[in-house]
Amino acid sequence: MKAICWHGHGDVRYESAPDPKIEDPRDAIIRVTRTAICGSDLHLLDGYMPTMKSGDVLGHEFMGEVMEIGSGVTRLKKGDRVIVPFNIACGECVFCKKTLFSLCDRSNRNAEAAAKMMGYSPSGLFGYSHMLGGFSGGQAEYVRVPYADVGPLKIPDGLTEDQVLFLTDIFPTGYMAAENCQMEKGDTVAVWGCGPVGQFAIQSAWMFGAGRVIAIDHVPERLALAKSWGKAETIDFTRQDVYETLKEMTGGLGPDRCIDAVGAEAHGTGSLDAVIDKAKAAVKLATDRPHALRQAIYCCRKGGTVSVPGVYVGFLDKVPMGAFVNKGLTMKTGQTHTHRYTRPLLEKIQAGAIDPTRLITHRAKLSDAPALYKKFRDKEDGCIKVVMTP
C-alpha cells in the first residue's frame, strides 16, 4: 500500500509500506477513505516526540470502510463505514470501565517504555511513536484497527465523510477541553491557540454555557475563523499584551476559565521566555516550549480553571507553580477519552448544532501530504485544516 512515512526531523514521505494484516481476533482492516493532518503530527515532523523509527506510518485522524474483520469482532461487518478514535482502548480494563479510554491499561503493547517516562502508561495511539505502541497510522490506504469491537463507530447514511471525520480526534478533544473547564453558566473563557482544536474548544465552550469566549492567536485566518464561526472576541498577541488586554476585558478579574490549545511548540513571538524555550529546545536542553501554559496560569482569575488539551511531550521549564498554587487554580488535562464522546457529538452534527466542515481549508490527495505538512506547520496559504483522500 501507499502511506505517509516518517524518516526523521522534517522528513515525511509518500511511499510504499507493508499491507496490514489481521493479527488478533479483535482486529479489523479498514480501507481509508478520509484522513487528516493534525497539529499533534507536527510534533513528530519537528522531532519532538521520542521513539519514532524511520518508516513509521503516520496519522491518527482517519475513517473508512471495513474490509476484513477478525473472528472476535461482532459489532462490525464488511462494508460498514466507520470513524476510528485516535486512541486505542480494550473496553474491559479498569480505566475503560470508568470511560477513561485514553488511559486504557491494555492497548499499549510497549507500556513498559511509556512507564519509564511517565510512571504509568496511557493507551496506545495510532501513528504516534513506539513508546505509545508503535501502531501504524491512518495516513495510508489501509490500516489495522485493534479492538475493533470497541472503538470504530458506524456512520449512518445521510452524513458526508467531511462532516464526521473530526469525530476521530479534534472535535472530541475541543469538547473535552471545554468540559474540563468545569464551567459555570455565563463564564468568560479564554482560549490560547486558534488551530483546529482551539476552534472546536471555542464552539464547545458555547455549548457548555459560556458567556464570553476570547480567542488568542497571531495568524489572521485563524483569528478571523474564531470570530466568524466561533463568534469569539479576539486578541492578536503580536499587537496586544495578552495579560493587560484580558485584565481590561474582564474588569480586572481575569478569565474564569483558560484553555491551552497550543501545547509543546508555543511561539510566543518576541517574549523572553519563548525565545529561551526555543533556544533550549534547539540544543536539547528542554523538551517543550510551554509559553502558552505559563501565560494561561498567569492570566486566569483567582479560583479559576486551566484546561490543557495541548500536547506536551516531557519536562516543562519554569512553569509558575507559585502563581498556580497561591491563586487556588485547578488544572484538568489529558489525552481525549474519544470513545466517550463520538456518539453524542455525532448526534449534535445530525441535529445541525455544528458544521465541522467549516474548519476545512485544504483538500488534497494523500500523495500531496509531504508538502502540506510543511504548509500547515508554517501556516501558509491560509492553511488551517487539511483533509486528504488516498
Image (tube, rainbow, N blue to C red):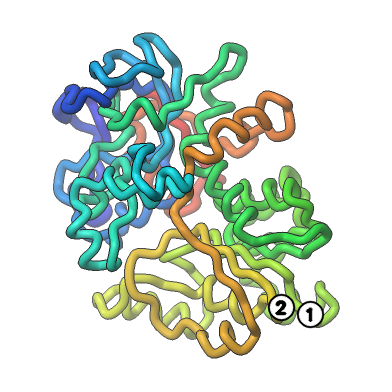
Residue type at numbered disc 2 = Arg
* Residue 326, placed above or below residue 268: below
Query: If the image is split into quadrants, where does the C terminus sit?
Result: top left
Residue 301 circle label: 2
Callout 2 touching callout 1 (CB < 8 Å): yes
- Relative placement, left or right, of 118 versus 151 is left
* Residue 109, placed above or below residue 369: below
Q: Is residue 205 visible?
A: yes
Identify the residue position indicated by label 1 in the image: 253
Q: Earlier in the sequence, mark 2 or mark 1?
A: 1
Question: x and y percent of residue 275 in the render?
Answer: 43, 80
Q: Distance between the residues labelled 2 and 1?
A: 6 Å
Q: Total marks drawn? A: 2
Please give the name of the residue rendered at 47% of the width and 67% of the height, measured from the top-left corner: 266
Q: Picture quarter containing residue 217?
A: bottom right
SS at mark 2 in the image: loop
Q: Is residue 41 visible?
A: no
Query: If the image is split into quadrants, where does the N terminus sit?
Result: top left
Question: x and y percent of residue 234 in the render?
Answer: 73, 61
* Residue 4, placed above or below residue 200: above
Please give the name of the residue rendered at 75% of the width and 59% of the height, measured from the top-left corner: 213
Q: Picture quarter containing residue 280?
A: bottom left
* Mark 1 closeness class: few <14, some 14–19, many ≥20 residues within 10 Å: some
Which is more toward the observer, 372 or 207?
207
Please give the name of the residue rendered at 72% of the width and 63% of the height, measured from the top-left corner: 189
Question: x and y percent of residue 87 in the render?
Answer: 38, 43
Which is more toward the observer, 269 or 93?
93
SS at mark 1 in the image: loop
- Relative placement, left or right, of 96 versus 30 is right
* Mark 2 closeness class: few <14, some 14–19, many ≥20 residues within 10 Å: many
Which is more toward the observer, 134 or 183?
183
